[in-house]
Amino acid sequence: MKNRLEPMAAFFASRADGYDDHMLKEVDGCKEGYLEMAQRIPKSCKTLLDLGCGTGLELDEIFKVLPDIRVTGIDLTQTMLDILKQKHPDKQMTLICGSYFDVPFGTEGYDCAVSFQTMHHFSHGVKTGLYRKIYHALKPGGVYIECDYMVEKQEEEDFYYAENARLRREQGIPGDAFTHYDTPCTIENQIRMLHCAGFCEVEKVFRRESTTMLVAKTEKEMV
């Protein structure tokens, strides 16, 4: 069936071998975004939570800047985590195969959290709840950095959400099932959700085509 929605984990598992090339060469802004994200990690950061880490393209660059950083990476796809392990066998990584909605993050355990091109599949309510979870997982002065597919106009966002709902209805897929379909939000809505989750300062720091990076800070500055 044309536009058949695939379960999220199966979608990425079937594309794991070509994922790095696709992101670096075919998705505008990602190659530059990985470099930008690495530079935005506070130099004092010792513990990092990576949500939807995949094959670790952002970590490839982060490890160049902070080679001794301790990483907890969460991803739905074991095949991608295996690729990440092979790329960085000597790094301090705890890799968890599962949904970052279900995996406990703990409280105030991380200096920084990141996500790269993984959040543009979920509703406002679901994302805001996740952002609260991230906020509580960060130490005082912690930073969350999100680089994702975002749009500029509300009409664009509304179109993608409506299409996703239509396809789910036609294919009998429950609204809470994790399927792969892009539902990018506007930059303004993303910032609003992060503020609602508790972050006191949210700034857009990078945009290339639709690839956009936000830095969200907690109450106190990291020293």
Image: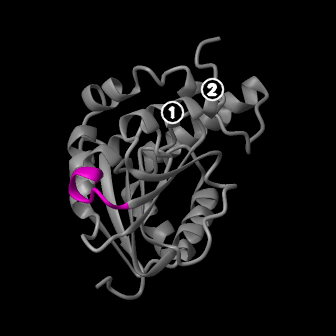
Element assignment for label 2: helix
Sequence-first disc among 2 and 1: 2
Q: Quadrant of residue 205?
A: bottom left
Element assignment for label 1: helix
- Residue at the image point whose x is 52% and y is 38% from the top: 160
Image quarter hosting the N terminus: top right
The residue sitting at the top extreme is: 1
Q: Is residue 65 magenta?
A: yes
In the rendered structure, the answer to whether residue 194 lies left or right of residue 162 reads left
Q: How many marks?
A: 2
Cα–Cα span, label 2 and label 1: 15 Å
Label 2, on which residue? 10
Q: Is residue 151 visible?
A: yes
Query: Would you say the residues marked 2 and 1 are in contact, meaning their CB atoms lie under 8 Å apart?
Result: no
Relative to 105, is 176 above or below? above
Q: Position of residue 178 (x, y in %)?
A: 67, 39
Image quarter hosting the C terminus: bottom left
Which amino acid type is shown beneath numbered disc 2? Ala
Label 1, on which residue? 82
Q: Position of residue 36 (x, y in %)?
A: 22, 53
Q: Quadrant of residue 48?
A: bottom left
Q: Is residue 216 magenta?
A: no
State the residue in front, 88 or 10.
88
- Residue at the image point whose x is 34% and y is 48% from the top: 59
- Residue at the image point whose x is 61% and y is 35% from the top: 164
Relative to 48, is 150 above or below? above
Write the start and end of the magenta stretch as one range: 63-69
In the rendered structure, the answer to whether residue 30 lies left or right of residue 133 reads left
